[in-house]
Image: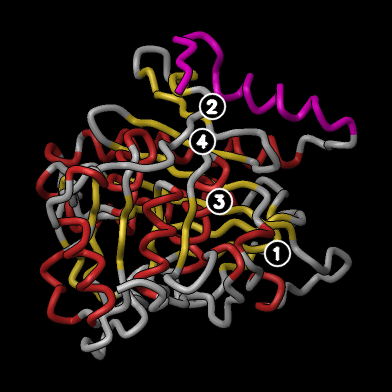
Amino acid sequence: MQKSGVGITITQHILNQQRQYPEATGAFTNLLNELIVAAKVISREVNKAGLVDILGSTGEINIQEEQVQKLDVFANRVIIERMQHIGELCCMGSEEVADLINIPSQYPKGNYILLFDPLDGSSNIDVNVSIGTIFSIYRRTNEGSDEVLLDEVLQRGIKQVAAGYFIYGSSTIMVYTTGNGTGVHGFTLYPSVGEFLLSHENIKIPEKGKIYSVNEGNYNYWDEKTRALVDYFKAKDKETGRPYTSRYVGSLVADFHRNLLKGGIFMYPADLKDPKKPHGKLRLMVEANPLAMVVQEAGGYASDGQGPILEVEPKELHQRTPLFIGSKRDVELAEEFISGKRS
């Protein structure tokens, strides 16, 4: 990974990429810039969470049957309110909202679709562990129609025009890609100037890592193939560089970010014996697809255990999927175990 130091801002970087496309109208740049403003607002609140009454649960349950945290509600509201008025979106979809989020009639509409997880890992807020915002951007398929149909939103991940995440930890970092060989780039928020500055240029994930990240508390819920895979990573074998080191934060965005920089594999398999999570816990549209686009552009791979996540045909907005993501060779190995080609 090449580091170029501080200097270029995220706005400069987006504009430089826009100039490579003479037909660009600036709509996409406007969209990303407003999303960055929303992330700055969320970052500010996360950083003072222990000082004000925004910690803990609201007592409500979201569409995913999970406790809604106060910061979840705040982050979700900030993104919706910041993004709905800019005139570049035809609709939005959030992990926290059951249905599509329509753009109010008083605002102009555009041809982009924004899907997002407003605060991934929010159960870790109270213990000061890194959390994040994950986002995915598509172009609608029927640009001439006023009404946005769900079918226009349920596109394969390979159709994304941009994806990325913000991670709120010891520092706030934005990582994003627009695909097509443009690379994956990371920007760190410098609070003193209020700008994201380029800190991780052209991120490349190692082809093979030494870290596996999985919630082993679910071991008894897994099938024999998944257990065999985890047992393989834990077994000692000097020739293949095993055992791997276990690292699991419990925030997808935090575990993914570490492995993106250092190499390794994150796994959330199907919990076949758990009636609540027979297809795993993670959401295809707002978690798996955007991170799959990022890791693929960085030279890695993402799979549901049978094939590429980016090729999965979505059937529901809140569809869940198993996820194996990270260094290419590690994920391909996982795929061999899960598909039954290796035992």
User: In percent of the image, x 46 and y 64: which residue is there?
Assistant: 303
Amino acid type of the residue tagged 4 in the rendering: Ile
Q: Amino acid at mark 3?
A: Met
Nearer mark to the viewer, of 2 and 1: 2
Q: CA separation, marks 2 and 3? A: 14 Å
Mark 3–mark 1 Cα distance, whole angstroms, equals 32 Å
Q: Which residue is mark 1?
A: 105
Give residue 108's position: percent from left, percent from top.
75, 54
Asked if marks 2 and 4 touch (Cβ < 8 Å), the reply is no
Residue indicated by mark 2: 202
For the residues marked 2 and 4, what is the alpha-carbon distance in whole angstroms? 20 Å
Q: Nearer the viewer, residue 263 or 154?
A: 263
The image shows residue 301 at horizontal and vertical percentages of 49, 53
> Magenta stretch containing residue 23, yes or no?
no
Q: CA distance from mark 1 to mark 4?
A: 24 Å
How far separated are the C-alphas under marks 3 and 4?
Answer: 19 Å
**Crowding near the residue tagged with mark 4, few <14, some 14–19, many ≥20 C-alpha atoms within 10 Å:** many
Residue 226 placement, left or right of 303: left
**Left or right: 188, with 239 as reference point:** right
- Read off the residue under disc 4: 36
Horizontal side, residue 99 vs residue 233: left or right = right
Residue type highlighted by circle 2: Asn
- Give the quadrant of residue 263: top left
Residue beneath disc 3: 293
**Considering depth in this image, is 202 or 191 the residue closer to the camera?**
202
